[in-house]
Image (cartoon, rainbow, N blue to C red):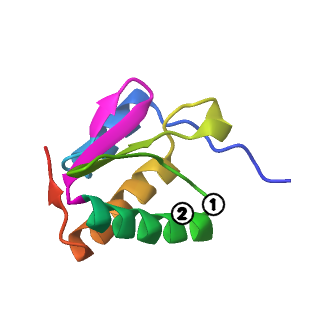
Amino acid sequence: MTDTPAPLTEREIAAALDDAPGWHRDGEHITRGYGIRYHGGVALIVHVADTERLIGHHADIDLRWDHVRFTITTHDAGHRLTAADFDLARRIDAIATAHGAQPLE
């Protein structure tokens, strides 16, 4: 049995957002979009999904014709933000860069 992840404090969330340029808070989620054509977006999502499987943490993903948006929260922490969310955000940024995706914000 694993421990429940600890939600971050408001101060910790603010600091983590400072270290995650382009990610925006939306309630108890962080979100970011990237411009990328549909089939490139599919490849990006597969790469992100492989990483998510390895780390055991997953984003909600919205794929459109010309962009993809990731929304992250920790379900096991009562849909609150944790350090794992910001770790995944950094990983998604690196993967998006490798796929040539352009930040929308």
Q: Nearer the viewer, residue 39 or 80?
A: 39
- Residue 102 spot, x, y in % from top left: 14, 59
Mark 2 neighbour density, 10 Å: few (under 14) some (14–19) many (20 or more): some
- In the picture, the quarter occupied by the C terminus is top left
Q: Residue at x 48, y 49 (%)?
A: 59
Q: Residue at x 14, y 47 (%)?
A: 104
Q: Residue at x 51, y 43 (%)?
A: 82
Distance of label 2 from label 1 (alpha carbons): 6 Å
Q: Judging from the image, what secondary structure is the residue with disc 1 in?
A: loop
Q: Nearer the viewer, residue 61 or 25?
A: 61
- Residue 93 spot, x, y in % from top left: 28, 62
Vertical arrangement, residue 101 with respect to residue 5, above or below: below
- Is 28 placed left or right of 97 in the picture? right
Q: Quadrant of residue 5?
A: top right
Q: Residue at x 25, y 52 (%)?
A: 19
Which amino acid, by three-letter code, is at mark 2?
A: Glu
Residue that carries the numbered disc 2 in the rendered image: 52
- Mark sitting on residue 56: 1
Q: Which residues are magenta?
A: 24-37
| Residue 48 in magenta stretch | no
- Is 38 placed left or right of 84 in the picture? left
- Residue 29 spot, x, y in % from top left: 42, 33
Q: Nearer the viewer, residue 68 or 8?
A: 68
- Decide whether the magenta segment is chiefly helix, strand or loop: strand
Q: Nearer the viewer, residue 94 or 7?
A: 94
- Mark sitting on residue 94: none
| Residue 25 in magenta stretch | yes
